[in-house]
Image (cartoon, rainbow, N blue to C red):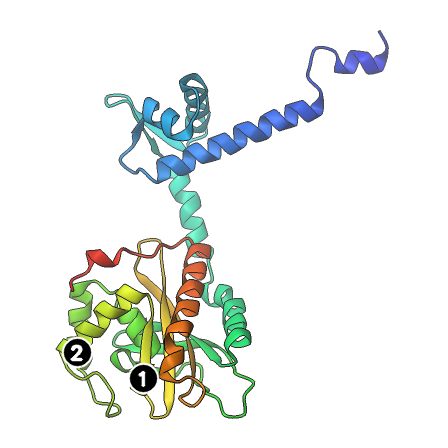
Amino acid sequence: MTEGKRRTAGRPASGKSNAGHSQSLVRGLNLLELLAAHPGGLALSDVAEQADLAPSTTHRLLQALQSQGFITQDEALGLWRIDVKTFRIGNSFLEARDFVGASRPFLRRLTHLTGETANLGVRDGATAVFLAQSESPQMMRMITRLGSRAPLHASGVGKALMAWLPDDELERVLAERGLDQVTPNTLSTPATLRQAMAEIRQHGYACDREEHAIGLHCVAACIHDEHGIPLAAISVSGPVARIPDTRLAGLGELIRETAAEITALLGGRVPDASNFRP
């Protein structure tokens, strides 16, 4: 037997071996994702059924993940769950994410598609603070100084953030700030504001119809974290002459879809609107 033959005898070709390892890796990651979606744990039979794998294959993959500390088994109940190592990896992603930096390409895309200024803002107490912007190329355009603030109830970004707050947090915001009448169009009563919040959750976007500045329309949508809590909001703003009422719905869908893209990119999730008080 030659030297070359001796080296390959008794083992599969490297291509087949790599393919097998890749398939096992993909299957193992799929099982990890499946268990992460069921924090209460799953029995071996349920994991195998949902992953469409043989129980023996599933058990082998689960044991491999367990040996590396990614999952654990409750032997008393026979349930498999994610373990602390998976939690640490997830946390490292959450700590490293830069939602402002991640959003900038999307803001530029919104400006390119709409011709208007796109903004990103976050909530600080009862106000929205603007942290990033993509300016419209139009001569007459909306410009917000970075770091400037607007009342939550009287701005598109603010209302998009406000709509998804837990009820107790919303009550604290209202008690802290009240509902100042910024323009004649500002929502200044709890009843009109709550109705607007329900509509925002239903449609997935918020509209500011000259509520913060006369002659200016704004459409905004919320970016959510992994718990469904508001993380930030993006908006498109411009003069009423270019963003009339008839254009708001179309812009709203575009911004809602863009916010959902950013939410997914950051590992967040959009909460179920039915879980909120009408």
- Residue 153, given in percent of the width and then of the height, sits at 25, 79
Residue at numbered disc 2: 192
Tell me which numbered mark, 1 or 2, is placed earlier along the sequence.
Answer: 2
Question: Element at badge 1?
Answer: strand
- Whether 27 is drawn above or below 204: the answer is above
- Under mark 1, the amino acid is Arg
Q: Quadrant of the N terminus?
A: top right
- Residue 230, given in percent of the width and then of the height, sits at 32, 64
* Image position of 106 (left or right of 203): right
Q: Quadrant of the C terminus?
A: bottom left
Residue 273 seen anywhere in this rendered image of the structure: yes
Residue at x 49% of width, y 81% of height: 116
Residue at x 27% of width, y 78% of height: 152
- The numbered disc on residue 250 is none
* CA–CA distance in space, label 1 to label 2: 14 Å
Q: Splitting the image into 4 quarters, where does residue 255 fall?
A: bottom left
In this view of the protein, which residue sits in the foreground, 169 or 51? 51
Residue at numbered disc 1: 209
Residue at x 17% of width, y 78% of height: 192
Q: Is the residue under label 2 in contact with that under label 1 (CB below 8 Å)?
A: no
Question: Element at badge 2?
Answer: helix
- Residue 166, given in percent of the width and then of the height, sits at 21, 62
In this view of the protein, which residue sits in the foreground, 71 or 44? 44
Residue 121 seen anywhere in this rendered image of the structure: no
Classify mark 2: residues with Cα within 10 Å, few (<14), some (14-19) or many (20+): few
Residue at x 41% of width, y 59% of height: 263
- Whether 5 is drawn above or below 266: the answer is above
- Under mark 2, the amino acid is Thr
Q: Splitting the image into 4 quarters, where does residue 2 fall?
A: top right
From this viewpoint, which residue is outermost toward the top?
Answer: 1
